[in-house]
Image: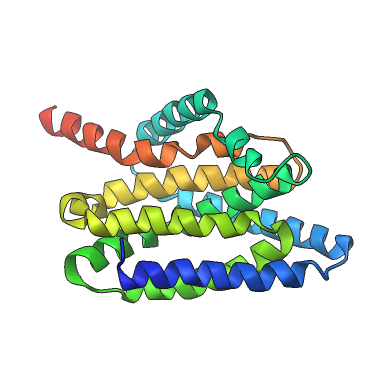
Amino acid sequence: MLNIAVVVNTLAVLIGSTVGFFTGKKLPDRFRQILFTAIGALTIGLGVRLFLDYSNALVVLGSLVIGVIVGEVLDIEKQIGKLAGKRSSETFVKGFITATVLFLAGPMTIIGSISAGLEGNNEIIFVKSLMDGISSVMLAASFGAGVFLSAGSVYVVQGSLVTLAAYLSFLGGEAYIGDFSAVGGLILLMLGIRLMNIKEIRVGNFLPALVFSPVLSYFAKLISERL
């Protein structure tokens, strides 16, 4: 968990969020709305791009279905909102979910973490840290404090992957990464739809799907090998 690359990535998000948070306070509402729209459009585009990498559509669908059932039972989005209070909970939740999914849903998270854990090669996560730091400035300027909390997600998820890399090296397989990216892509797509005010979707409750994706990919691979 104390891998230097993971710490750097976490600090990059915290520093970028701090800069964006205080910069965003000076922005007029109309500029903040423009940022919302721009981020929403980019999120939709990234979501479509990541989805196209899928390996098994049934794994992607199953991950989303099981994930959202668990998310609804736990009411994850409501629990996140409680951290901010009633006045700013909606923006806080959007900021946390947007940043968390953007920072963790792509293949760089898995490949970089496994490379750091198995080979001591931190290059991918260092590059990702720069990207996340820059992104967190814009996100925090738009959504505020919720982006800070996403640093915790980065630390816990990537730190766990690095620590357990010896046992999770199979996640570097093309099928696992493809389906994981596709699940993250669809979550990003739903998030973009929400940010663009097209439809209100409780995207936070879909987050467990990212955990179930590699599990279902594993069982799908076992079944295909026996057939």
The answer to whether residue 107 is seen in the rendering is no
Compared with residue 129, is residue 221 higher up or lower down, i.e. above or below?
A: above
Residue 85 position within the rendered picture, expressed as x and y whole percent measured from the top left: 71, 42
Residue at (16%, 33%) from the top-left corner?
222
- Count of number-bearing discs: 0
Residue 207 position within the rendered picture, expressed as x and y whole percent measured from the top left: 49, 40
Residue at (37%, 66%) from the top-left corner?
6
Q: Residue furthest left?
A: 226
Residue at (38%, 59%) from the top-left corner?
109
Compared with residue 171, is residue 21 higher up or lower down, i.e. above or below?
A: below
**Picture quarter with the N terminus:** bottom left
Residue at (69%, 42%) from the top-left corner?
194
Residue 191 position within the rendered picture, expressed as x and y whole percent measured from the top left: 62, 45
Residue 152 position within the rendered picture, expressed as x and y whole percent measured from the top left: 47, 56
- Residue 9 horizontal side relative to residue 197, left or right: left
Give the colour scheme of this rendering. rainbow
The answer to whether residue 101 is seen in the rendering is yes
**Picture quarter with the C terminus:** top left
- Residue 137 horizontal side relative to residue 49, left or right: right
- Residue 23 horizontal side relative to residue 202, left or right: right
Camera-nearest residue between 89 and 110? 89
Compared with residue 141, is residue 143 higher up or lower down, i.e. above or below?
A: above
Camera-nearest residue between 44 and 215? 215
Camera-nearest residue between 45 and 172? 172
Camera-nearest residue between 116 and 200? 116
